[in-house]
Image (spheres, grey):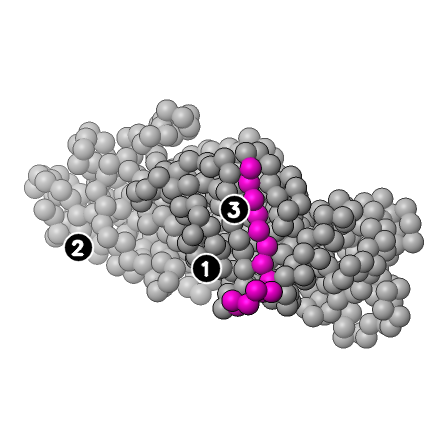
């Protein structure tokens, strides 16, 4: 039997350290040291618990075992009565502390256990939590995992949809979060009525404001300052904000996961402190910008809300004849030539709009059209999907029709980019013009 420690944290990083758990297992499997407790990642984690590693460095090198036993227990607690639970797999059946459950219900009870883990004192507390969850209404179980969708009217009269956190507090009681550390108590019967009212509005909780909801359950009125805090909190956690936040987390993750994907910021020419466009700089065989002009955090859904452009590095002439260099100086333009195919060239006249990182010059070429199939894709997902296509641009030329005409723009010479930031590298650019001085400097560096 082997032991290892796993740390679980919330998906939005609002509370970084939820709990640490010791896993005891006889299966030679692979676990990441940190796990996220949203439904999708917990499902993947539980499936991985029963996949045996076959050796090597690749995580995909494993097989699924038919049966296995894994024990989860508190860190630094060796007592016989310590909080723990056991998950057993036997062929296609799963058991938790002896109770047979479907994989879907196992994910739900697992998330509930991890979230409440620091509050457990002994093994009986864990058992009681499992039994309460399995005997609970499916609607409440679903809300514990996916939150409650709740509509409210703001002070300005706008209708917003937010997602309310819900937690179990006892055998027949739950609490709903209105604001950080401000929870409303419900019995399971009451919260079931509230969940149904949020869908149909056909009971006493139908169309109830958050002020009235607090009074109905707590018997007290919110103060004016509390109302403002609650409204700001609910707006921050509205469904659209969470969709945007999680999709942009994916964009941040790509820039950390792939060394050839870097965050991109393009600053306004007239206001050097204002970011005009932001997105990703992707280095495949060619160089690509995937960016947008929306405000940070703005909720955007669509099919094509981002711009996809190929970009060339303006490098000194390579093996140019003296006649060609003299022609460039005489006619005030600069030629960039592909070393792989000398017939592939493009010219940049003096006065043209280019980009600079403070040291190097970039020429943004034409835009290409890459469409999403669906019409309500979040901004972050649009950026991420295009970035993954362009990361392997040469291989995807035959897959994406609009990339086929870009083949001649692949394979140009590149310089070493100048990045900013310590943990997260960022390519920061601003618009400028190609000047006569730039031209003369480039020609003087001819190789």
* Disc 3 crowd, CA 10 A, few/some/many (<14, 14-19, 20+): some
Measure how far apart labels 2 and 1 are at the Cα level: 58 Å
**Residue 95, picture quadrant:** top right
Measuring 55% from the left and 30% from the top, which residue is drawn there?
Answer: 373
Disc 1 secondary structure class: strand
Please report contact status of discs 3 and 2: CB closer than 8 Å, yes or no: no
Q: What range is drawn magenta here?
A: 77-90
Measuring 49% from the left and 49% from the top, which residue is drawn there?
Answer: 250
User: Is residue 422 rendered to the left or right of residue 17?
Assistant: left
Measure how far apart labels 1 and 3 are at the Cα level: 17 Å
Measure how far apart labels 3 and 2 are at the Cα level: 69 Å
**Residue 418, picture quadrant:** bottom left
Residue 441's mark? 2
User: Is residue 182 rendered to the left or right of residue 207?
Assistant: left
Note whether 23 is above or below 182 in the view shown. Answer: above
* Disc 2 crowd, CA 10 A, few/some/many (<14, 14-19, 20+): few
Is 164 part of what is drawn in magenta? no
Measuring 15% from the left and 44% from the top, which residue is drawn there?
Answer: 317
Residue 69's mark? 3
* Disc 1 crowd, CA 10 A, few/some/many (<14, 14-19, 20+): some
Tell me the residue that label 1 is attached to: 5
Mark 3 vs mark 2: in front:
3
From this viewpoint, is residue 403 visible? Answer: yes
Q: Most extreme residue toward the front, as rendered?
A: 80
């Amino acid at each position: 039997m082997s032991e290892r420690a796993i740390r679980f944290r919330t998906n939005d990083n609002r509370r970084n350290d939820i709990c640490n758990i010791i896993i005891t297992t006889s299966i030679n499997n692979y676990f990441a040291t940190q796990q996220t407790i949203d439904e999708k990642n917990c499902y993947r984690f539980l499936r991985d618990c029963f996949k045996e590693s076959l050796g090597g460095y690749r995580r995909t090198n494993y097989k699924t075992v038919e049966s296995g036993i894994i024990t989860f227990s508190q860190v630094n607690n060796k007592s016989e009565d310590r909080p723990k639970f056991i998950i057993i797999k036997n062929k296609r059946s799963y058991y938790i502390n002896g109770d047979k459950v479907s994989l879907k219900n196992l994910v739900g009870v697992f998330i509930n256990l991890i979230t409440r883990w620091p509050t457990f004192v002994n093994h009986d507390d864990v058992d009681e939590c499992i039994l309460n969850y399995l005997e609970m209404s499916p609607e409440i179980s679903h809300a514990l995992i996916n939150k409650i969708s709740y509509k409210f009217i703001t002070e300005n009269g706008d209708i917003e949809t937010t997602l309310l956190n819900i937690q179990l507090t006892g055998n027949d009681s739950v609490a709903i979060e209105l604001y950080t550390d401000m929870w409303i108590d419900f019995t399971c019967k009451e919260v079931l009525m509230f969940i149904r009212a949020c869908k149909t509005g056909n009971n006493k909780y139908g169309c109830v404001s958050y002020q009235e909801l607090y009074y109905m359950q707590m018997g007290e009125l919110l103060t004016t300052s509390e109302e403002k805090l609650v409204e700001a909190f609910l707006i921050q956690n509205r469904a659209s904000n969470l969709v945007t936040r999680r999709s942009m987390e994916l964009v941040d993750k790509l820039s950390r996961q792939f060394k050839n994907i870097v965050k991109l910021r393009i600053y306004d020419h007239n206001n050097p402190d204002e970011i005009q466009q932001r997105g990703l700089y992707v280095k495949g065989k060619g160089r690509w910008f995937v960016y947008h002009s929306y405000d940070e955090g703005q909720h955007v859904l669509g099919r094509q809300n981002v711009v996809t452009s190929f970009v060339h590095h303006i490098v000194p002439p390579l093996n140019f004849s003296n006649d060609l260099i003299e022609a460039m100086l005489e006619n005030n333009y600069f030629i960039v030539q592909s070393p792989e195919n000398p017939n592939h060239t493009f010219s940049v006249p003096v006065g043209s709009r280019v980009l600079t990182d403070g040291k190097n010059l970039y020429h943004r070429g034409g835009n290409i059209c890459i469409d999403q199939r669906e019409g309500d894709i979040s901004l972050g997902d649009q950026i991420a999907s295009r970035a993954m296509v362009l990361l392997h641009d040469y291989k995807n030329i035959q897959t994406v029709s609009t990339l086929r005409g870009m083949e001649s723009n692949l394979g140009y010479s590149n310089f070493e980019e100048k990045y900013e930031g310590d943990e997260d590298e960022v390519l920061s650019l601003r618009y400028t013009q190609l000047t006569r001085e730039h031209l003369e400097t480039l020609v003087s560096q001819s190789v």
